[in-house]
């Protein structure tokens, strides 16, 4: 008895520091902020409750039979014979249940793959260990890597407390930026090994495979910053290539996009100007 009490005390003491973690821990999948994530969550809950009802019926009947027809109550073994009617019943009922689950599941799967009428197409390429985002038709492209403060804190012997770094290992130097309410089509591929682009709040995860293009879409209904990670073991630094998506109001997104295009165009203009000055200097020197 003392051993049991001692073990219970140790267990309680072990759980005390983890109260905050347990408070944030969720058993169920999140609802998310996209149309697809809500549909997937709804389908998940529908199938879950169907399975709960089946479990209640099956285990309820088993427990009732065990209690009601136990040997101590004088029950004797039944002598069953073949029953075509019983076989038809226990075949039709499971088939009907499976068909009933397949219809909404198929509708959701079709919706997940429907990338038509997208407002924005972004090509995402996975590298060891970063992401490249290319806004097709907009002439905007950049790499997204682990934020420097997280990268410094993860180094052995850095002396930096990871708890002091905001969004440790879940922050990047340049996030993907999309407008709120826009249907975003994502084309996924890889330049080296298999990666997986995953943002839980969007309800979407798909592999980035070398030499192959996968696609997915999402429409975020709420502005904010949403974080994910590479979800496919891709090498030594697999755990250090997060995904960060900033969802902005349309006006802010337009300003950001114009700024990116301005930055892309400023470099060639500066180079051309420098080349012009250099040519002029060369001409003057030759004339002298």
Image (spheres, rainbow, N blue to C red):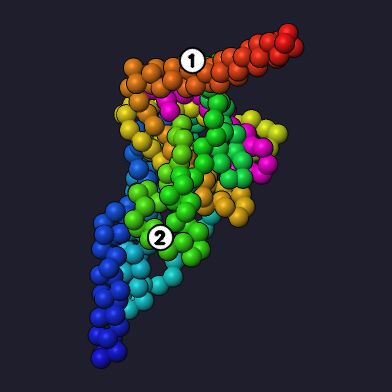
219, 89: nearer the viewer: 219
The residue that appears at 51% across and 37% down in the rendered structure is 144
Q: Say if mark 1 contacts mark 2, CB within 8 Å.
A: no
The stretch of residues the image draws in magenta is 177-199
Residue beneath label 2, please? 160
Query: In this rendering, is residue 123 above or below 278?
Result: below
**Residue appearing at x 27%, y 86% in the figure:** 6
What x and y, as percent, mark residue 73? 30, 75
Where does residue 127 sit, x and y in percent of width and height?
61, 41
Residue at the extreme bottom of the image, as rendered: 2
Q: Is residue 209 above or below residue 240?
A: above
> Farthest residue toward the right?
286
CA neighbours of label 1 inside 10 A, class few (<14), some (14 to 19), many (20+): few
- Which of discs 1 and 2 lies nearer the camera? The answer is 2
Q: To which quarter of the image does residue 223 belong?
A: top left
Residue at far front of view: 288
Q: Residue at x 62, y 52 (%)?
A: 235
Residue 122 among magenta residues: no
The image quadrant where one finds the C terminus is top right
Does dot 1 land on a helix, a strand or a loop?
A: loop
Name the quarter where the N terminus is drawn: bottom left
Give the residue displayed 66% in from the left and 44% down from the top: 193
Residue 189 included in the magenta stretch of the image: yes
Q: Name the N-terminal-most of marks 1 and 2.
A: 1
Residue with the mark numbered 1:
117
Which mark is drawn over residue 210? Answer: none
Observer-nearest residue: 245 or 53?
Answer: 245
């Amino acid at each position: 008895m003392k051993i049991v009490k001692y073990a219970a005390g140790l267990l309680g003491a072990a759980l005390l520091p983890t109260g905050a973690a347990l408070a944030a821990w969720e058993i169920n999948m999140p609802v998310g902020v996209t149309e697809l994530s809500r549909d997937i969550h709804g389908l998940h809950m529908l199938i879950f409750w169907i399975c709960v009802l089946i479990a209640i019926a099956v285990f309820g009947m088993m427990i009732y039979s065990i209690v009601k027809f136990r040997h101590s109550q004088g029950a004797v073994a039944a002598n069953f014979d073949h029953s075509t009617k019983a076989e038809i019943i226990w075949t039709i009922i499971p088939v009907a249940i499976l068909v009933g689950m397949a219809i909404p599941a198929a509708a959701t799967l079709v919706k997940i793959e429907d990338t038509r009428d997208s407002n924005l197409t972004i090509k995402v390429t996975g590298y060891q260990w970063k992401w490249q985002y290319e806004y097709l038709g907009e002439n905007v492209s950049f790499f997204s890597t682990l934020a420097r403060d997280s990268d410094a804190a993860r180094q052995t012997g850095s002396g930096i407390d990871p708890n002091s770094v905001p969004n440790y290992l879940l922050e990047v130097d340049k996030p993907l930026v999309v407008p709120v309410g826009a249907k975003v089509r994502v084309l996924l591929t890889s330049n080296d090994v298999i990666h997986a682009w995953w943002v839980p709040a969007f309800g979407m995860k798909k592999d980035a495979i070398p030499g192959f293009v996968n696609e997915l879409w999402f429409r975020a209904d709420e502005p904010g910053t949403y974080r994910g990670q590479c979800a496919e073991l891709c090498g030594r630094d697999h755990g250090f290539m997060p995904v960060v998506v900033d969802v902005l109001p349309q006006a802010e997104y337009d300003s950001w996009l114009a700024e990116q295009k301005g930055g892309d165009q400023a470099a060639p203009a500066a180079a051309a100007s420098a080349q012009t000055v250099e040519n002029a200097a060369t001409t003057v020197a030759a004339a002298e």
